[in-house]
Image (cartoon, grey):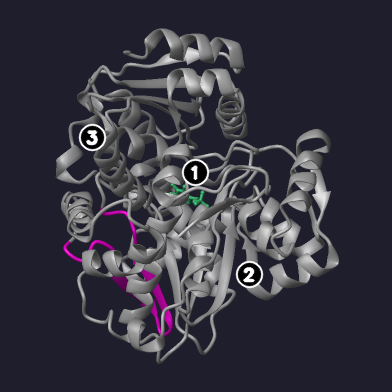
Amino acid sequence: MKYVSTRGAAPVLSFGEAMMTGLARDGGLYVPETVPVFSAEEIADLAGKSYEEIAFRIMRPFMGDTFSDDEFKGLIAKAYAGFGHAARAPLVQLGPNHFLLELFHGPTLAFKDFAMQLIGQMMQAALAKSGQRITIVGATSGDTGSAAIEAFRGLANVDVFILFPHGRVSDVQRRQMTTPSEDNVHALAVDGDFDDCQAQVKNMFNDFDFRDGVGLAGVNSINWARVLAQVVYYFSSAVSLGAPHRKVSFTVPTGNFGDIFAGYIARSMGLPIDQLVIATNQNDILHRALSTGEYRTNGVTPSISPSMDIQVSSNFERVLFDAYGRDGAAVAALMDELKTGGGFKISQGALQSLRAMFGSGRCSEDETRATIKSCYAATTEVLCPHSAVGVKVAEENLGAVPMITLATAHPAKFPDAVEQATGLRPGLPPRMADLFDRAERVTRVPNDLKALQALIRERRRS
Ligand SMILES: *Cc1c(COP(=O)(O)O)cnc(C)c1O
């Protein structure tokens, strides 16, 4: 299995290389050259299997010879052993034809753990073989950072630097990043928003001297290995509702487009998905793009679902690549326009194909709070604000096909918003009950590439 860049001008890589590389050297994102298709029998045969077994069968064809089968099975087992639920990704029923996929039972209480715990295991195993050292630099809107820190804290051959927007993450999210005491962990509070953090990480990757000098590795959702790990729960949940004999639909609270892109891959692999619905908060660039045909940024407005406060959805580039017939030069031109002019028009043909693949909807702040309240009243399920955005948009799209909404974080990560909506303050699970007693360690940094690079060069252990 080979991986190619969405901008068509970077080396073709193996799975292991694409995982360690993150962003392609032409600024693009790696995607598989071809997507393996599973037969109906192969999908049916996943029914009743453990999450780990399904993970092995779904991911194996993408991985080439990076790991042996036994080795990969061992990594999967370790990745999910720390989850607080035996099913890993349990389904809960909300209504007659509406289900919630709880993806928040991992160590940092958000769906990011599904990919990050596994990529942590895989990178560790790959580094042990090569004897290499790496510096992981990631941008976070709140949940990626803690998931990455949790996956890499204390490792001898890895330094982790996480950039988060100062003052724009919840207290629980911040404390999950600032309280680990290991000296390979560095939480950096940037004076800017998430898009600034993400842009600085991309700038560092595009500075080849710096990139090669510190052994830069990326674990943002631009990393293909993360997307791949997320494909698994689309299969596990769909199969438990009767796929491939019965179609299912998904609604996905969306920010950087990584999670829903994994659903798109699942469909390309043969999973019979009817609707794939993008749910956005008031930062609705994706919903506007699909509605109007114009992808245009207009500034991030902070919301009560901060992990979706994003205007430049990196992984959207991956579907654009397909929608433009895998024309890397065309994608590169669009991304150039985005960078210099703040947006671009999607061609008529590409727009048609995007609309055939995705539905979309937007949920306001008031609607988010109202949904947390009504869902609790109707079902006793307590939603986090991101999951509520998903449930609200899913409710507008319910039909004859079962709808699965992805619950992306645990309500206890956003206790203020949940308390305001329900009067109930969700408690942290016992394993992290002392989070507010631990000491914090954080460095405030300007939104400045040179300053960030100097700090990383100085702090990393070499
Ligand atoms: C990251 C995140 C999202 C958005 O996921 P993307 O893959 O960036 O689209 C939604 N909800 C929560 C809680 C998240 O942490």
Q: Nearer the viewer, residue 140 or 200?
A: 200
Callout 3, which amino acid? Answer: Ala
Is residue 199 depicted above or below 284 in this figure? above
Mark 3 burial class by Cα count in 10 Å: few <14, some 14-19, many 20+: few
Q: Is residue 311 left or right of residue 46?
A: right
Q: Is mark 2 within 8 Å of ligand 1?
A: no
Callout 1, which amino acid? Answer: Ser
User: Which label is found at residue 358?
Assistant: 2
Q: Nearer the viewer, residue 373 or 244?
A: 244
- Point out the frontmost of discs 2 and 1: 2
Q: Is residue 258 left or right of residue 153?
A: right
Q: Is mark 1 within 8 Å of ligand 1?
A: yes
Looking at the rendered structure, the secondary structure element under dot 2 is loop
Q: Is mark 3 within 8 Å of ligand 1?
A: no
- Point out the frontmost of discs 1 and 3: 3
Q: Which comes sooner in the sequence, label 3 or label 2?
A: 3
Looking at the rendered structure, the secondary structure element under dot 3 is helix
Is residue 73 depicted above or below 199 in this figure? below
97 drawn magenta? yes
Q: Is residue 9 left or right of residue 410?
A: right
Residue 210, percent across and down? 53, 18
Callout 2, which amino acid? Answer: Phe
Rounded to the nearest angstrom, the CA distance separating label 3 from label 2 is: 41 Å
Q: Which comes sooner in the sequence, label 1 or label 3?
A: 3
Residue receiving disc 3: 128
Q: Nearer the viewer, residue 59 or 229?
A: 59
- Point out the frontmost of discs 3 and 2: 3
Residue receiving disc 1: 307
Residue at 32% over, 32% down: 149
Number of callouts: 3
Residue 99, percent across and down? 39, 75
Residue interval drawn in magenta: 86-105
